[in-house]
Image (cartoon, grey):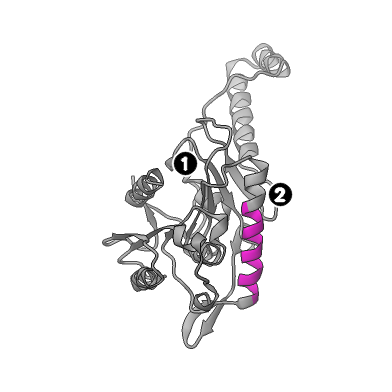
Amino acid sequence: MSNYVECSELTLNTKTFKMKEAKSSQIPMKSLICRLIMGPVATIIFSLIFAVNNCQAQNTPEGDLSLKYLARQPTEKSEHPPVIILLHGYGSSEADLFELRSAFPKNYLVVSARAPLTLEDGAYQWYRGANTDGQRDGNAEDLKDSIAKVKNFISEIVEKYHADPAKVYLMGFSQGAVMSYEVGLTSPELLTGIGVFSGAIFPSLKPRIKSSPALQKLQIFIGHGTADDRIKYSSATNADAYLRSLHLTPSFHSYPGMAHHISQEELADVNRWLEGH
Protein backbone atom coordinates (compact mmCIF):
# COMPACT_ATOMS: atom_id res chain seq x y z
CA MET A 1 0.00 0.00 0.00
CA SER A 2 1.31 3.45 -0.88
CA ASN A 3 2.39 5.79 1.90
CA TYR A 4 0.58 8.61 0.15
CA VAL A 5 -3.04 9.38 -0.63
CA GLU A 6 -3.29 11.11 -4.02
CA CYS A 7 -5.74 14.00 -3.73
CA SER A 8 -4.86 16.22 -6.69
CA GLU A 9 -7.53 14.51 -8.76
CA LEU A 10 -10.34 12.06 -8.23
CA THR A 11 -8.95 8.57 -7.74
CA LEU A 12 -11.22 5.58 -7.33
CA ASN A 13 -9.77 2.93 -5.07
CA THR A 14 -10.91 -0.68 -5.08
CA LYS A 15 -13.58 -1.13 -2.43
CA THR A 16 -14.91 -4.19 -0.67
CA PHE A 17 -18.67 -3.97 -0.43
CA LYS A 18 -20.08 -5.57 2.70
CA MET A 19 -23.26 -7.45 2.08
CA LYS A 20 -26.10 -6.37 4.37
CA GLU A 21 -29.20 -8.31 5.09
CA ALA A 22 -32.15 -6.58 3.44
CA LYS A 23 -34.94 -5.51 5.74
CA SER A 24 -37.53 -4.85 3.04
CA SER A 25 -40.10 -7.60 2.64
CA GLN A 26 -39.59 -7.41 -1.14
CA ILE A 27 -35.94 -8.43 -1.01
CA PRO A 28 -36.46 -11.93 0.39
CA MET A 29 -39.16 -12.49 -2.23
CA LYS A 30 -36.82 -11.49 -5.05
CA SER A 31 -34.08 -13.63 -3.58
CA LEU A 32 -36.51 -16.51 -3.34
CA ILE A 33 -37.53 -16.06 -6.98
CA CYS A 34 -33.86 -16.04 -7.99
CA ARG A 35 -33.27 -19.26 -6.09
CA LEU A 36 -36.34 -20.96 -7.52
CA ILE A 37 -35.86 -19.89 -11.14
CA MET A 38 -32.14 -19.66 -11.73
CA GLY A 39 -30.43 -21.06 -8.67
CA PRO A 40 -27.45 -19.83 -6.66
CA VAL A 41 -25.68 -17.94 -9.50
CA ALA A 42 -28.64 -15.59 -9.93
CA THR A 43 -28.80 -15.08 -6.17
CA ILE A 44 -25.16 -13.98 -6.09
CA ILE A 45 -25.61 -11.64 -9.09
CA PHE A 46 -28.72 -10.07 -7.59
CA SER A 47 -27.00 -9.59 -4.24
CA LEU A 48 -24.01 -7.89 -5.88
CA ILE A 49 -26.23 -5.54 -7.87
CA PHE A 50 -28.19 -4.67 -4.73
CA ALA A 51 -24.99 -3.97 -2.78
CA VAL A 52 -23.46 -1.80 -5.51
CA ASN A 53 -26.68 0.20 -5.92
CA ASN A 54 -26.79 0.76 -2.16
CA CYS A 55 -23.20 1.99 -2.14
CA GLN A 56 -23.80 4.33 -5.07
CA ALA A 57 -26.84 5.77 -3.33
CA GLN A 58 -24.78 6.47 -0.20
CA ASN A 59 -22.24 8.39 -2.34
CA THR A 60 -24.79 10.51 -4.20
CA PRO A 61 -24.08 14.17 -3.34
CA GLU A 62 -26.67 16.18 -1.46
CA GLY A 63 -27.88 19.35 -3.20
CA ASP A 64 -30.01 21.06 -0.57
CA LEU A 65 -27.43 23.61 0.67
CA SER A 66 -25.19 26.34 -0.82
CA LEU A 67 -22.73 23.69 -2.07
CA LYS A 68 -23.22 20.10 -3.12
CA TYR A 69 -21.66 17.67 -0.67
CA LEU A 70 -21.24 14.19 0.75
CA ALA A 71 -21.61 13.53 4.47
CA ARG A 72 -20.60 10.76 6.86
CA GLN A 73 -22.59 10.68 10.04
CA PRO A 74 -20.58 10.02 13.21
CA THR A 75 -20.63 6.38 14.29
CA GLU A 76 -20.14 7.46 17.90
CA LYS A 77 -23.33 9.44 18.37
CA SER A 78 -23.79 12.65 20.34
CA GLU A 79 -26.52 15.27 20.44
CA HIS A 80 -24.25 17.94 18.93
CA PRO A 81 -21.35 16.30 17.08
CA PRO A 82 -18.15 18.09 16.13
CA VAL A 83 -17.76 18.56 12.38
CA ILE A 84 -14.98 18.50 9.79
CA ILE A 85 -15.71 20.18 6.45
CA LEU A 86 -13.36 19.18 3.62
CA LEU A 87 -12.54 21.28 0.54
CA HIS A 88 -10.98 19.47 -2.42
CA GLY A 89 -8.24 20.58 -4.80
CA TYR A 90 -8.27 21.89 -8.38
CA GLY A 91 -9.95 19.64 -10.94
CA SER A 92 -11.34 17.26 -8.35
CA SER A 93 -14.71 16.84 -6.64
CA GLU A 94 -16.37 16.21 -3.30
CA ALA A 95 -15.81 12.47 -3.79
CA ASP A 96 -12.02 12.84 -3.61
CA LEU A 97 -11.40 13.89 -0.01
CA PHE A 98 -14.49 11.93 1.06
CA GLU A 99 -12.30 8.86 0.50
CA LEU A 100 -10.46 9.92 3.68
CA ARG A 101 -13.57 9.96 5.88
CA SER A 102 -12.65 6.79 7.78
CA ALA A 103 -9.30 8.34 8.74
CA PHE A 104 -11.00 10.92 10.96
CA PRO A 105 -12.35 10.32 14.49
CA LYS A 106 -15.58 8.34 14.68
CA ASN A 107 -17.36 10.98 16.77
CA TYR A 108 -17.04 13.60 14.00
CA LEU A 109 -19.53 14.43 11.30
CA VAL A 110 -17.38 14.52 8.13
CA VAL A 111 -18.63 16.60 5.20
CA SER A 112 -16.91 16.97 1.82
CA ALA A 113 -18.02 19.92 -0.34
CA ARG A 114 -17.93 20.46 -4.11
CA ALA A 115 -16.41 23.67 -5.50
CA PRO A 116 -18.90 25.88 -7.39
CA LEU A 117 -16.96 26.36 -10.65
CA THR A 118 -17.15 23.54 -13.21
CA LEU A 119 -14.15 22.64 -15.36
CA GLU A 120 -15.81 19.60 -16.90
CA ASP A 121 -18.04 16.78 -15.76
CA GLY A 122 -16.71 15.56 -12.40
CA ALA A 123 -14.00 18.25 -12.19
CA TYR A 124 -14.41 21.52 -10.27
CA GLN A 125 -12.43 24.48 -8.96
CA TRP A 126 -12.84 27.14 -6.27
CA TYR A 127 -11.28 29.94 -8.32
CA ARG A 128 -9.38 30.69 -11.50
CA GLY A 129 -5.75 31.68 -11.26
CA ALA A 130 -4.44 35.24 -11.31
CA ASN A 131 -1.29 37.23 -10.53
CA THR A 132 -0.72 39.95 -7.95
CA ASP A 133 2.56 41.84 -8.46
CA GLY A 134 4.04 38.80 -10.15
CA GLN A 135 2.93 36.41 -7.42
CA ARG A 136 0.41 33.58 -7.74
CA ASP A 137 -3.06 34.62 -6.63
CA GLY A 138 -6.71 33.86 -7.35
CA ASN A 139 -9.31 35.65 -9.44
CA ALA A 140 -10.84 38.22 -7.07
CA GLU A 141 -14.47 37.67 -8.10
CA ASP A 142 -14.13 33.87 -7.96
CA LEU A 143 -12.61 34.06 -4.48
CA LYS A 144 -15.30 36.43 -3.25
CA ASP A 145 -18.08 34.18 -4.54
CA SER A 146 -16.54 30.94 -3.24
CA ILE A 147 -15.78 32.45 0.17
CA ALA A 148 -19.40 33.57 0.53
CA LYS A 149 -20.66 30.11 -0.47
CA VAL A 150 -18.35 28.31 1.96
CA LYS A 151 -19.32 30.64 4.81
CA ASN A 152 -23.02 30.03 4.15
CA PHE A 153 -22.35 26.31 3.81
CA ILE A 154 -20.65 26.15 7.22
CA SER A 155 -23.66 27.74 8.92
CA GLU A 156 -26.07 25.52 6.98
CA ILE A 157 -24.22 22.32 7.93
CA VAL A 158 -24.18 23.29 11.62
CA GLU A 159 -27.91 23.99 11.51
CA LYS A 160 -28.96 20.95 9.45
CA TYR A 161 -26.96 18.39 11.41
CA HIS A 162 -27.24 20.10 14.82
CA ALA A 163 -23.45 20.17 14.98
CA ASP A 164 -21.53 21.74 17.83
CA PRO A 165 -20.79 25.34 16.70
CA ALA A 166 -17.79 25.36 19.04
CA LYS A 167 -16.23 22.39 17.24
CA VAL A 168 -16.20 23.24 13.53
CA TYR A 169 -13.05 22.55 11.53
CA LEU A 170 -12.49 23.56 7.90
CA MET A 171 -9.80 21.51 6.13
CA GLY A 172 -8.62 21.63 2.56
CA PHE A 173 -6.06 20.30 0.11
CA SER A 174 -4.27 22.49 -2.47
CA GLN A 175 -6.95 24.94 -3.76
CA GLY A 176 -9.11 23.77 -0.87
CA ALA A 177 -6.26 24.61 1.52
CA VAL A 178 -6.07 28.11 0.05
CA MET A 179 -9.82 28.41 0.64
CA SER A 180 -9.39 27.28 4.25
CA TYR A 181 -7.02 30.21 4.78
CA GLU A 182 -9.35 32.59 2.93
CA VAL A 183 -12.40 31.69 5.01
CA GLY A 184 -10.70 30.98 8.33
CA LEU A 185 -8.58 34.12 8.47
CA THR A 186 -11.40 36.47 7.41
CA SER A 187 -14.30 34.85 9.30
CA PRO A 188 -12.67 33.10 12.27
CA GLU A 189 -15.84 33.40 14.34
CA LEU A 190 -17.36 30.59 12.22
CA LEU A 191 -14.64 28.08 13.03
CA THR A 192 -12.66 26.41 15.77
CA GLY A 193 -9.76 25.74 13.45
CA ILE A 194 -8.48 25.18 9.93
CA GLY A 195 -6.41 22.33 8.52
CA VAL A 196 -4.19 23.31 5.61
CA PHE A 197 -2.78 20.46 3.48
CA SER A 198 -0.33 21.75 0.85
CA GLY A 199 -1.68 25.30 0.67
CA ALA A 200 -0.61 28.93 0.51
CA ILE A 201 -1.69 32.38 1.67
CA PHE A 202 -2.37 34.61 -1.33
CA PRO A 203 -1.03 38.17 -1.32
CA SER A 204 -4.56 39.52 -1.82
CA LEU A 205 -5.69 37.88 1.44
CA LYS A 206 -3.33 39.70 3.79
CA PRO A 207 -5.00 43.15 3.65
CA ARG A 208 -8.36 41.52 4.43
CA ILE A 209 -7.22 39.90 7.69
CA LYS A 210 -8.43 41.88 10.70
CA SER A 211 -7.20 41.35 14.24
CA SER A 212 -9.93 40.11 16.58
CA PRO A 213 -10.38 37.87 19.63
CA ALA A 214 -11.86 35.20 17.34
CA LEU A 215 -8.75 35.28 15.13
CA GLN A 216 -6.48 34.88 18.14
CA LYS A 217 -8.43 31.78 19.19
CA LEU A 218 -8.33 30.18 15.72
CA GLN A 219 -6.44 26.87 15.73
CA ILE A 220 -4.33 26.27 12.62
CA PHE A 221 -2.75 23.06 11.32
CA ILE A 222 -0.25 23.38 8.45
CA GLY A 223 1.09 20.29 6.68
CA HIS A 224 3.30 20.34 3.58
CA GLY A 225 5.72 18.04 1.76
CA THR A 226 9.24 19.28 1.10
CA ALA A 227 9.16 17.81 -2.43
CA ASP A 228 5.88 19.48 -3.47
CA ASP A 229 6.34 20.69 -7.05
CA ARG A 230 2.87 22.25 -7.44
CA ILE A 231 2.67 24.47 -4.37
CA LYS A 232 6.21 24.96 -3.16
CA TYR A 233 7.23 24.05 0.37
CA SER A 234 8.28 27.67 0.87
CA SER A 235 4.58 28.61 0.64
CA ALA A 236 4.05 26.73 3.90
CA THR A 237 7.07 28.18 5.71
CA ASN A 238 6.14 31.68 4.52
CA ALA A 239 2.56 31.20 5.73
CA ASP A 240 3.80 29.96 9.11
CA ALA A 241 6.08 32.98 9.52
CA TYR A 242 3.34 35.40 8.48
CA LEU A 243 0.79 33.91 10.87
CA ARG A 244 3.27 34.09 13.73
CA SER A 245 3.78 37.77 12.92
CA LEU A 246 0.05 38.14 13.66
CA HIS A 247 0.67 36.49 17.06
CA LEU A 248 -1.01 33.27 15.97
CA THR A 249 0.53 29.88 16.81
CA PRO A 250 0.03 27.42 13.95
CA SER A 251 0.93 23.77 14.39
CA PHE A 252 3.47 23.31 11.58
CA HIS A 253 4.29 19.88 10.14
CA SER A 254 6.94 19.20 7.51
CA TYR A 255 7.04 15.92 5.56
CA PRO A 256 10.48 15.23 4.02
CA GLY A 257 10.33 13.87 0.48
CA MET A 258 6.54 14.12 0.18
CA ALA A 259 5.20 15.62 -3.06
CA HIS A 260 1.72 17.11 -3.64
CA HIS A 261 -0.12 14.55 -1.54
CA ILE A 262 -1.69 13.86 1.83
CA SER A 263 0.19 11.16 3.70
CA GLN A 264 -0.95 8.70 6.33
CA GLU A 265 1.51 10.36 8.70
CA GLU A 266 -0.12 13.73 8.05
CA LEU A 267 -3.57 12.32 8.77
CA ALA A 268 -2.30 10.88 12.05
CA ASP A 269 -0.81 14.29 12.93
CA VAL A 270 -4.04 16.15 12.20
CA ASN A 271 -6.00 13.69 14.35
CA ARG A 272 -3.62 14.30 17.26
CA TRP A 273 -4.09 18.03 16.66
CA LEU A 274 -7.87 17.57 16.80
CA GLU A 275 -7.59 15.65 20.06
CA GLY A 276 -5.69 18.57 21.58
CA HIS A 277 -8.56 20.97 20.97
Q: Which mark is residue 276?
A: none
**Residue bearing the label numbered 2:** 63
Q: What residue is rendered at 49% in x and 46% in y?
A: 99
Q: Is residue 64 above or below residue 102?
A: below
Could you give the CA–CA distance between mark 2 and mark 1, rounded to whole angstroms?
Answer: 26 Å
Q: Can residue 87 be seen in this snapshot? A: yes
- Tag 2 secondary structure: loop
- Tag 1 secondary structure: loop
Q: Dominant secondary structure of the magenta stretch?
A: helix
Q: Total label count?
A: 2
User: Quick one: 246 or 224, which is closer to the camera?
Assistant: 246
Q: Can residue 218 be seen in this snapshot? A: no
**Residue bearing the label numbered 1:** 14
User: Quick one: 140 or 19, which is closer to the camera?
Assistant: 140
Rendered location of residue 243, percent (x, y): 40, 69
Left or right position of 45 against 246 = right
User: Quarter of the image containing the N terminus?
Assistant: top left
